[in-house]
Image: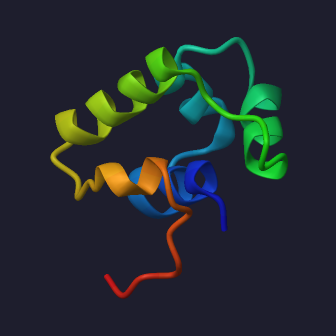
């Protein structure tokens, strides 16, 4: 599982459309591309927006998730 997919589904638990809104990108298609292409992903600005939303919601966060795709973790 790549980092974007993990953060969207396991941390924020939102749809691709909602994640696109959080990241500040135009469409759900961008999120789909980030999740399917390991060489494509959010910009630093988009990552900062995602991180800020996770922290705003007071959810568990690890900056390492941005650099190493997490393995399935026990909650």
Way the structure is coloured = rainbow
Who's the residue at 66% across and 68% down the image? 1
Q: Position of residue 4 (x, y in %)?
A: 59, 48
Residue depicted at x 15% and y 46%: 58
Horizontal relation, residue 67 to residue 11: left or right: right
Q: Position of residue 18 (x, y in %)?
A: 56, 32
Residues 23 and 43: in front is: 43
Q: Tell me which residue sits at (22%, 53%) in the image.
A: 59
Count the marks.
0
Indicate left or right for 30 with 10 as reference: right
The relative height of residue 73 versus residue 62 in the rendered view (above or below) is below
| 73, 38: nearer the viewer | 38
Horizontal side of residue 32 vs 72, given as left or right: right
Q: Is residue 36 left or right of residue 23?
A: right
Vertical relation: 1 (above or below) 26: below
Q: Is residue 62 above or below residue 31?
A: below
Which residue is at 20% across, 39% downward?
Answer: 55
- Quarter of the image where the C terminus is located: bottom left
Q: Position of residue 21 (x, y in %)?
A: 54, 21
| Above or below: residue 69 compared with residue 63 | below
């Amino acid at each position: 599982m790549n980092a974007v997919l993990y953060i969207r589904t396991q941390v924020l638990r939102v749809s691709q459309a909602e994640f696109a809104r959080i990241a500040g990108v135009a469409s759900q298609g961008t999120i789909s591309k980030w999740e399917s292409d390991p060489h494509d992903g959010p910009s630093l600005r988009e990552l900062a927006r995602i991180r800020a939303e996770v922290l705003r919601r007071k959810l568990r966060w690890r900056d390492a998730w941005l650099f190493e795709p997490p393995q399935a973790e026990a909650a």
